[in-house]
Image (cartoon, grey):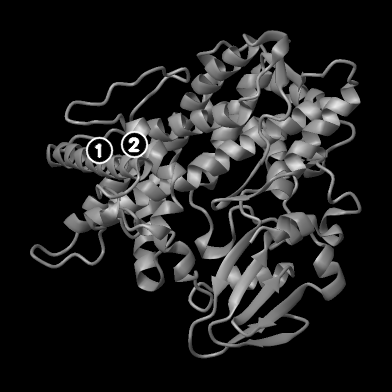
Amino acid sequence: MGWPFKDKYALHKELGGNFIIVTPGGSELVIADPEDAHTVLSRRKEYIKPAVMYEQLNVFGPNLNTAEGEDWQRHRRLTAPSFNEKISSLVWEEAMSQAHDMGSSWYQEGSLGTKSTIDDTATLALHVLTSAGFGVAYKFNHGVQLPSEGHAMSYRESLAHCLKNIITFAIIPKKYLSSRWLPYKLRILGKAVQEFQLYMEEALERERAMISKRKSGAGNLMSALIQASEETQASERPGARSDLSLSDREIFGNIFMYNLAGHETTANTVATALILLAAHPKCQEWLLEEIDMVFGRLSIVERKDYIMLFPKLRRCLAVMFETLRLYGSIPFIPKSTPSEPSVRLESQRRVYSIPPATFVSINVQALHTDPTTWGSDSLIWRPSRWMVQDPSSRVGVNEHLITPRTGTFIPWADGPRNCPGQKFAQVEFIAVIATLFSSYRVEPVLEDGQSLGIGQKNLLSMVEGSAISAITLQIQEPRKVALKWEKR
């Protein structure tokens, strides 16, 4: 599964933009032609998600990521309004608060630095999700959290268990996880599933009670999702069976999917970007120029103005894009043709007839490293490649992000089934990066007699050693090198 990350574009350079692997067990079409990749991702009815790879994601109910056909259209229509500017503003503030406390804890480690970058960004991302998704706020250094009344686990603890063990759901059905004959760790997971389910049921009941009293909801992802579904149901004929709104199971399924899709992916992207910035001090200084220009002498309160500040932090977004280009969480996007009939894939240069039940893999890593698109330094992490500036302008003025050619940059997929949480992730990433580097610089902690250059190379080897773990690309030796944070 993880070979595209190691191979980059090399195999396609030898075999061409697309090639097919034929085995006795079936065929796999691997696509790295931008036009064909865009076509496949745009034609959702002809190229579907392989059910066997997504079944475990239905653990709490059907959701946007697993639905197909008319069901998918209904899910998309009702989930899209959840990701609005009100949610983005909430994400901005919460991410800044979490990043402020995280940076402070790293600075206090002094010259020894911290080796918990990956763990800490995972905590930050989880806390942003619990706040923006469910309205439950936690401090970064949360300590011991007591469960809510009637619960054996806190909301945070139950969600963390479920997210960490997503692959287990593909092996052991949820209903068996509380069986006495299972090992203790699996029974704990079973308890976490029950607790998270109960928290969602209680939140659903609260939101519906507020809606019935014509009050606005809590303003988080779950309340927005419930309101959209309830409003759709209310618009239907009285007494009619609702086929347009979401069932309770579908609401729970989408809430869990929001958390799953937004946790490891964002945490890994933030952590990888921080490690890369520590390895590239010139790029770090380039980033600081923009942050200083945008934040200037703004107070902590003034920095919460998401509407005004977010659009100005273009270099921060360039750092995110470049990190996702080379180290995105998903190196390939799996698709499949239906069991019948054959599917025609037409482009300007050729026409393919793809057999039924063919596994189709969009090679994201190859698209993101193709030197035809990204130049001779396509394997080098260089965020400035994303920026264009009028040479006569001063720093940050008349500077804008490039728009890559269709199909060449797809970290959030492409077409109608692209990720609805794209803006959520961008807002969170930029808020964290801008908050940290408005106060600190970062560099590797050096071993005795080690040069700075060797320390930086060790950081790069950490990142290059990433591999697929569970369902996303992750750094395999996260504690190999410590990062030292210093006041600016």
**Lower position in the chain sequence, tag 1 or tag 2:** 2
Q: Where on the picture, by quarter, is residue 221?
A: top left
Residue 158: image quadrant is top left
Quadrant of the image containing the C terminus: top right
Secondary structure under tag 1 reads helix
On the image, the x and y values in percent for residue 229 come to 26, 53
Is residue 96 depicted above or below 38 in this figure? Answer: above
Callout 1 amino acid = Tyr
| Above or below 54: residue 454 | above
Question: Residue 439 in the image: x percent, y percent?
Answer: 66, 13
Residue at image location 56% in from the left, 39% down from the top: 266
Residue 239, horizontal then vertical, whole percent: 8, 64
Residue 475 tag number? none
Q: Which residue is mark 2?
A: 158
Do we see residue 283 in this rendering? no
Where is residue 78, by image quadrant? bottom left
The amino acid type, in three-letter code, at marker 2 is: Ser
Residue under label 1, please give it.
199
Q: Are marks 1 and 2 in contact (CB under 8 Å)?
A: yes
Quadrant in which the N terminus appears: bottom right
Image coords of residue 185 (percent x, y): 37, 41
Q: Secondary structure at mark 2?
A: helix
Judge from the rendering whether residue 205 lies leftward or rightward of residue 63; answer left or right: left
